[in-house]
Image (spheres, rainbow, N blue to C red):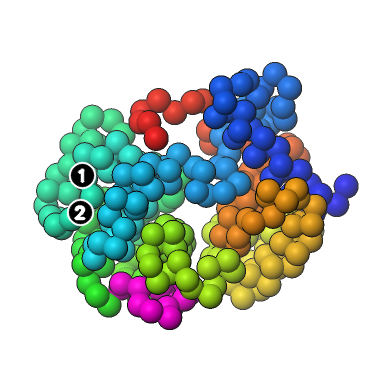
Amino acid sequence: MSNAQRVANWIMDRERLRTLNESGMPYDVYGDPILAKYRFCNVRREDDRVTRWLKKNWRDPYAGHPNMVGAMLLARMVNWPPTLEAIGFPEMWDADKTAHNIHEFSLLGKAWSAAYIVSTCGQAMDKAAYVVQTVGEVMGRPAYTPQPEDTLQAVWQRLRGINGLGAGFIAAQVVADLKYCDEHLLLARDWLSFAVSGPGSRRGLNRYWLRDKNAPCKEVEWKEWLNEMIVEVIPLLPPDLQDIHSQDFQNVMCEWDKYERVRLGEGKPRKAYKPETAYSV
């Protein structure tokens, strides 16, 4: 079986798992045992629980708010809805209050999601203080607000100028949210084609193209390989899955790398699957 067919099968099986989960039907009885046992993100990022919570509680109700860029950066650096609910959408930015709320949740147990790795970039400081400091560089500043004719790439490049966002992955996650709620980015000419690699998606594409999974590659090479992979995989998908855009395929490559790791006996994902009960969407 070609890797194009393997990826297409993974996409179809993961989407089937999502629909069965949402209908309350047990997937583990007759589905893929690896998908049933471990936690994998959805094919479409918009279907993931944290993103659905953000859409319902922050993105849609506050669309057009001048603090939206900073809010999405805060959301993705924290990435845990119970903490975000306690903070509330930052209509008026209060750094001290935000840091206090994060600390309170830290004392209670869990204040962050482990989905994205957010360090203090070598600075000897509290993580909550670091997050608030980084978000404060963006919050409400017109220089980071998308403008008419902006591309997703252009907004991402500006965000990378913020200390701590230079690697680009978290900045790309912010753009992935903004593209659905900013009036200018909804019309961006690279809405479908924009994507930025992460460690998992680089490993996934290396596997796809039969390279050493840890082989280094430049971002421009990764993007070319991503586009070539998409051209091969899309025709193998049913019509209802052929609208997946490049950022979703970046995510698919990351999750497919996790899947292949289990299938090939190289290791296991960090988390087994269990329904999330800490918050509702």
C-beta proximity under 8 Å, tags 1 and 2: yes
Please give the name of the residue rendered at 38% of the width and 79% of the height, measured from the top-left corner. Answer: 148
The crowd level at tag 2 (other Cα within 10 Å; few <14, some 14-19, many 20+) is many
Q: Which residues are magenta?
A: 144-157
Q: Which is more toward the observer, 227 or 102?
A: 227
Observer able to see residue 47: yes
Q: Which is more toward the observer, 151 or 252?
A: 151
SS at mark 2 in the image: loop
In reply to whether residue 16 is colored magenta, the answer given is no
Q: Which is more toward the observer, 205 or 212?
A: 205
Please give the name of the residue rendered at 56% of the width and 60% of the height, measured from the top-left corner. Answer: 247
| Residue 161: % across, % down | 35, 75
| Residue 67: % across, % down | 24, 62
- The outermost residue toward the right is 1
212 to the left or right of 177: right
SS at mark 1 in the image: helix
Please give the name of the residue rendered at 60% of the width and 46% of the height, measured from the top-left corner. Answer: 43
Q: Which is more toward the observer, 211 or 165?
A: 165
The crowd level at tag 1 (other Cα within 10 Å; few <14, some 14-19, many 20+) is some
Distance (Cα) linking label 1 and label 2: 8 Å
| Residue 172: % across, % down | 46, 63
| Residue 173: % across, % down | 44, 58
The C terminus: image quadrant:
top left
65 to the left or right of 37: left
Please give the name of the residue rendered at 79% of the width and 61% of the height, measured from the top-left corner. Answer: 232
Residue 159 numbered mark, or none: none
Q: Amino acid at mark 1?
A: Ile
- Residue carrying label 2: 90
- Residue carrying label 1: 87
Q: Amino acid at mark 2?
A: Pro
18 to the left or right of 144: right
Residue 58 higher or lower than 154, as above or below? above
